[in-house]
Image: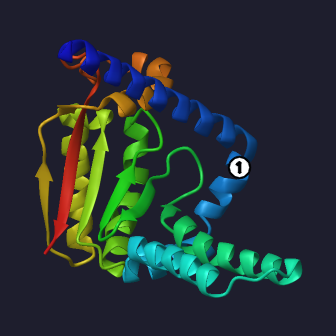
């Protein structure tokens, strides 16, 4: 009974992840170009650095709590005043929330950084393949990323992807990170974790890339005992 329940929970998580991925893909088709332009703009960079430096997650929590408190303390029945207040409060919440994301470049090869986890910045690979011709661009972005993290007072940078399961890819990333840290004059320690099987929700989300993953060379991706992809975590801590 317990095993069956675990299977049902895993299946539910998988389909939730798959549905989430489908919704995001559909949304990206509709407003993807506009969103990509904004997330990689100079203004977004300033917002990202400002809020991440203070602690973006805490800023968002304070804004939401402040909005709730203001709505409770100053209720109004006037529709015009309520509309203006609602607009102002919405803007107050949206700014720190949308400032948690920044893309280093425009285009398919850009790294996406999130500050949703406080002083830990998480980095997401935007594509499912890494070619030899992408290495110079990766080196440039990693150097910019390390400098950005120091400006934001981040304590750690975290990468986690099925692509990093391949030893060659994770070794390449670590080499670029160490070189980038040396070039900007900061000391870091890099920890490469053993590959672990992704969760049910992540498995559903990654299922959208099955076609791209199938085109990779044998041995680049590994499936675990539960039939889910393995992902490797690379963690950079600033001293």
Identity of the residue drawn at 22% across and 38% down: 232
In the current view of this chain or complex, which residue is farthest to the right?
80
Image quadrant occupied by the C terminus: bottom left
Indicate whether 65 appears above or below 237.
below
> What x and y, as percent, mark residue 196?
18, 33
Q: Which residue lies under the disc numbered 1? A: 33
In the foreground, 100 or 83 = 83
Q: Is residue 82 visible?
A: yes
Identity of the residue drawn at 18% across and 43% down: 171
> What x and y, as percent, mark residue 31?
73, 47
Image check: 194 left or right of 158? left
* Colour convention of the picture: rainbow
Indicate whether 86 appears above or below 205.
below
Residue 25 position by quadrant: top right
Tell me the SS state at disc 1: helix
Residue 222 position by quadrant: top left
């Amino acid at each position: 009974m317990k095993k069956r329940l675990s299977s049902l929970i895993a299946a539910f998580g998988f389909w939730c992840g798959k549905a989430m991925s489908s919704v995001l893909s559909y949304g990206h088709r509709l407003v993807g170009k506009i969103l990509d332009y904004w997330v990689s703009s100079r203004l977004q960079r300033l917002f990202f650095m400002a809020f991440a430096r203070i602690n973006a997650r805490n800023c968002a929590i304070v804004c939401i709590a402040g909005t709730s408190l203001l709505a409770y303390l100053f209720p109004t029945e006037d529709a015009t005043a309520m509309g203006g207040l609602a607009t102002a409060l919405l803007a107050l919440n949206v700014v720190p929330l949308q400032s948690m994301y920044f893309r280093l470049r425009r285009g398919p090869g850009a790294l996406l950084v999130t500050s949703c986890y406080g002083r830990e910045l998480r980095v997401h690979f935007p594509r499912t393949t890494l070619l030899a011709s992408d290495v110079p661009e990766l080196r440039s972005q990693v150097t910019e990323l390390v400098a950005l993290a120091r400006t934001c007072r981040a304590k750690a940078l975290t990468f986690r992807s099925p692509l990093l399961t391949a030893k060659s890819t994770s070794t390449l990333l670590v080499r670029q990170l160490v070189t980038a840290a040396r070039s900007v004059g900061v000391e870091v320690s890099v920890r490469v974790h053993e590959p672990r099987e992704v969760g049910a929700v992540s498995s559903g989300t990654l299922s959208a890339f099955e076609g791209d993953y199938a085109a990779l060379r044998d041995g680049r991706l590994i499936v675990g005992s539960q039939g889910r992809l393995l992902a490797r975590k690379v963690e950079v801590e600033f001293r």
